[in-house]
Image: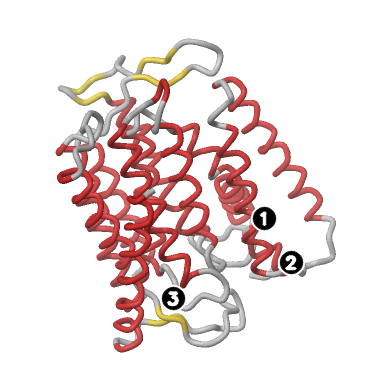
Amino acid sequence: MHIFLASAALSLILTLIVRKIALKLNIVDVPDNGRKKHTGVIPLLGGIAIFLAFWTVVFFVLNYTGVARKHLSDASLIGIFFGSVILVVVGALDDKYNLPPIVRLGATVIAAFCVIAGGGELYSITNPFGGYITLDAWRIGDILVLAAALIFFWIMGMTYTVKILDGLDGLATGVVMIGALMIHFLTAKGYFYQADMSAVSLVLAGVCAGFLILNFYPAKIFLGESGGLFLGFILGALAIVAGGKIATALLVMAVPVLDLVRVIYLRLKNKQSIFAGDRRHLHFVLVDMGVGQRSAVLIYYFLAFAFGISTLYLRSSQKLLALGILTVGMIFFEIWLATRVVPIKK
């Protein structure tokens, strides 16, 4: 608990400092009466505060508290660290200069390769129907190609899911906090006990909690591009390094992930760029249908927590079934939505 509280306190202090800096440098988000409907000018750069708080506490915990280091090797940490540096720097520049989407995409690709280069490999994944599926069938030197490909697409998917989820005050921050807590609970004791992963995931949850104090509706600071990219990247990387806790993170993020797939399909169907900004995402749809911002965010929190808790008790086949039920539910939601008079604003 002390790790969580220390992380939250440092995150809150750094957020207050970064908020003043962002206002002084005029790195702010201005409402446009379209997709951005917040009231007033809100400072960005929240990701810098979370980044600094996270890595400061992680460095202290892993080096000065006696936590056993069995899964987080120096190479893995260095790979994740440099990947996150790239994303935060590019994200902060985007907050200021509105960089082209291809630049952010390129930064995310490099960050994903940093995780792979740091030794973040999966040797096998759980077979939902029993046993394990090995990923060592195809090698190039010491690189497991199938494992590296899975890690790459997982990191890319998680990073962009959280980035896009950052559409309502406190939404992305809170959902990532729940995901980090689930990884902590799963690795804190029992069969999956991993002291280092338990501590680091608790740090991530703590820094999210501290930032959330100023980010929950009505927000006094936004994550910005740097924060959205950083949180998704770190959560995805931790799920990989923690012995492949992909199912846990995926179920916590299932609704946002499925919503992202739904929106990409709609954009391709309408011959739009998949990077186009609009209000088709579920969290925007809920608000446009009359659900308040705070209520919409709490709905997401409930779903993330409910499915996250289920991962602590369900077997692999049951997790797959839960994901399948969610997928079917999202399909029926889209069919129902198409019959509504409420327009989806672009």
Residue depicted at 45% across the width and 36% down the height: 185
Q: State the residue in front, 313 or 77.
A: 313
Dot 3 falls on a residue whose secondary structure is: loop
Please name the residue shown 63% across and 66% down the image.
Answer: 279
- Is 119 situated above or below 32? above
Q: Residue 331 or 293: which is nearer the viewer?
A: 293
Q: What residue would you read off at disc 3?
A: 221
Query: Where the C terminus falls, by quadrant?
Result: bottom right
First reached walking from the N terminus: tag 3 or tag 1: 3
| Residue bearing mark 1 | 299
- How far apart marks 2 and 1 lie (CA) works out to 10 Å
Q: Point out residue 25 in the picture as x, y percentages from the top left corner.
A: 29, 86
Tell me the kind of residue under disc 1. Answer: Ile
Kindly check if marks 2 and 3 are in contact, taking CB atoms under 8 A apart as contact.
Answer: no
Whole-number angstrom distance, CA of label 2 to CA of label 3 = 22 Å
Q: Is residue 133 above or below residue 254?
A: above
Image x and y of residue 305, in percent = 59, 45
Residue, x 33% and y 84% (percent of image)? 20
**Would residue 123 be found to the left or right of residue 190 on screen?**
left
Label number found at residue 291 = 2
Asked if marks 2 and 1 touch (Cβ < 8 Å), the reply is yes
Of 109 and 305, nearer the camera is 305
| Crowd around label 2: few <14 · some 14–19 · many ≥20 (10 Å) | some
Q: Secondary structure at mark 1?
A: helix
